[in-house]
Amino acid sequence: MKPTKGENIFHFLVVIFFIIASFCTLYPFWHVLMYAISDPKASMGGGLFFLPRGFSLYSFELMLQTKGIFQSYVNSLFRLIVGTFIALLFTAMLAYPLSVRRFAGRNTITMLIFFTMLFNGGLIPNYLLIKQLGMLNTLWALIIPGAISAWNLFIMKNFFQSIPPELEESANIDGASPARTLFSIILPISMPVMAAVALFYGVAHWNSYFDAIVYISDPKKQVLQVFLRGMMNVGSLSEVKDVDSMAASSGTVTEESIKMATIVMSVLPMLIVYPFLQKYYVKGVLVGSVKG
Amino acid sequence: MFTATEAVVRRRKAWGAKLGQFRKDKFLYLLALPGILFFILFHYIPMYGVLIAFKKYSVYKGFMGSEWIGLDNFKTLFSTFGFERALRNTIIISLYQLIFAFPVPIILSILLNELRHALFKKFVQTVVYLPHFVSWVVIAGIMFAILSPNTGILNEIARFFGFETPNLMVSKAYFRGLLVVSNIWKEAGFGTVLYLATLVTIDDQLYEASKMDGANKWRQIWHITLPGLRTTVVILLIFRVGSILNAGLDQVFALYNPQVYEVSEILDTFIYKIAFENARYDLATASGVFKSIVGLVLVICVNWIAKKIDSESGII
């Protein structure tokens, strides 16, 4: 059917709205990037709108020399890679049996897991448990307790349920063990949901910081976000000792620039992975979350 | 009529069948075992740990050795300086988020659904999802840069038009507004994912038919799109209301500063402080228990109301 005149006007306004919305979403990122690649002395005066003032990678250079930043970056990468892998493995291993209809007790187990979404012990009981388990001050305290998120588990389980059961049954008849069925039959055809859930776990690992503040006190084991937060909050780099001598000549000028450079570096891994996984997750979440 | 023995035989057979099934599927259980143990260890044991709230907890005596004191911790908690303020801030911030931030993804997804050019739609979606993937710490940094009274772009624009803006990040009057706006900026786009997933399930023929009957865009949205979204909205609303005492720990903890504690100290930050700065594990646990129970009761109530209105909706 041909759109009416009113519909055309409506559509035009919606397009204008989304152009403005997209600009408002992207501009802050652009601003930070421009700040980071500007000449630190020139950007001090502010007024950076669309283009960098001068061009210099000096902020990045200083940032890389900031004490502790490299270690925290490595810690975050470890958390991201190992944490996401473990989470995917554990979640799939539980989601699969829960998706098999003949599995006795699946409703009870599902209800008990669902209940954990509504009620939890809270900060202190969790903290004391981690302490009891001897995981305080280790990166495992950030990886193991979050190995399965109930939300992601249900997304995966629903996706597995949408796979025709005949597939699983025939594998069963051919004598494949459940583990084998899961890893060589179910998982290869579940790429959309695996990619979506991997993205969710990955983003959570990369961006979380409160658990790291609570469980980790040793600066050598700290993650990047906590390091970054310290940088923002201190409001001065005097705590980051190595930079002092270098930045002394330019004073607080470089301080903002270093922050911006660190932000750019912290967002980078996400920006690299995001476009590749993006096409999967809408599909994965779609099948996994809408009950059909 | 069954005789008693027949009933017993039947029951045994049923159990036998179950046991047989269990044996046949033992590898399936083995596969699920790590996950089940995970939930027991990291979710149910901490639930047991909430009993600390009813004990006078001493680090030296430990969980078992500490003595029971009934509800004393709760009494102390409610009269502790800062608790009332934290509770009030939590509820105010949560209500702001509920009223102003909750509807935005719904509106966005309805508008996104109206876009005709597939490529432009894809571009917009990619862009508006983006902030979701950035941490609150980074967003705090970006906000400091943009809102800074000296070099910030916002002030630059304001100055151009001849007025000065206050430093919003440390302003008691604006801080809660800032929380809501930044939350919309970060999460509203991504919040559309679930709604859009629901929208694709609406039959296109409904729109065609309503157009035949002369319905304009507003009527189509009102009579087809919105009813189609209802179930999803209700489910998300129940979760949101249930977590009314969660005012967004990650966000507040990244953005707030001593100048605005007065308006932004929430229960979660309060719990963190009494636990790790004052070393009162028992009081902090009591505060957590209070939070969890209120949340649970609210979820059950809202779910009950939703079911009364429409028996199809609800989460439980």
Image (spheres, coloured by chain):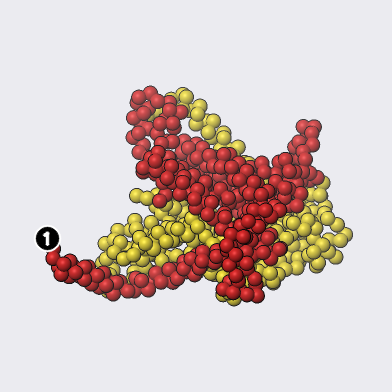
Q: Which residue is mark 1?
A: B1
- Element type at mark 1: loop
Q: Is residue A24 shown above or below A104? A: above
Q: Which residue appears at 44% of the width and 68% of the height?
A: B35
Image point (57%, 62%), residue name: B70
Which residue is pictured at 39% across the width and 69% down the height?
A: B32
Question: Where does residue A169 sit, x and y in percent of width and height?
Answer: 27, 66
Q: Which of A61/B150 is in front?
A: B150
- List x then y, in percent, for residue B184: 59, 44
Q: Which chain is yellow?
A: A
Quarter assignment of residue A62: bottom right
Question: For the N terminus of chain A, which image quadrant?
Answer: top left
Q: Mark yes or no: residue A125 visible.
A: no
> Chain for mark 1?
B
Asked if residue B232 lies left or right of residue B87, the reply is: left
A97 displayed left or right of A77: left
Instruction: Tell me: residue A90, above or below residue A28.
Output: below
Front-most of B131 and A233? A233
Which one is nearer the viewer's eye here, B235 or A63? Answer: B235
Rendered red, the chain in question is B
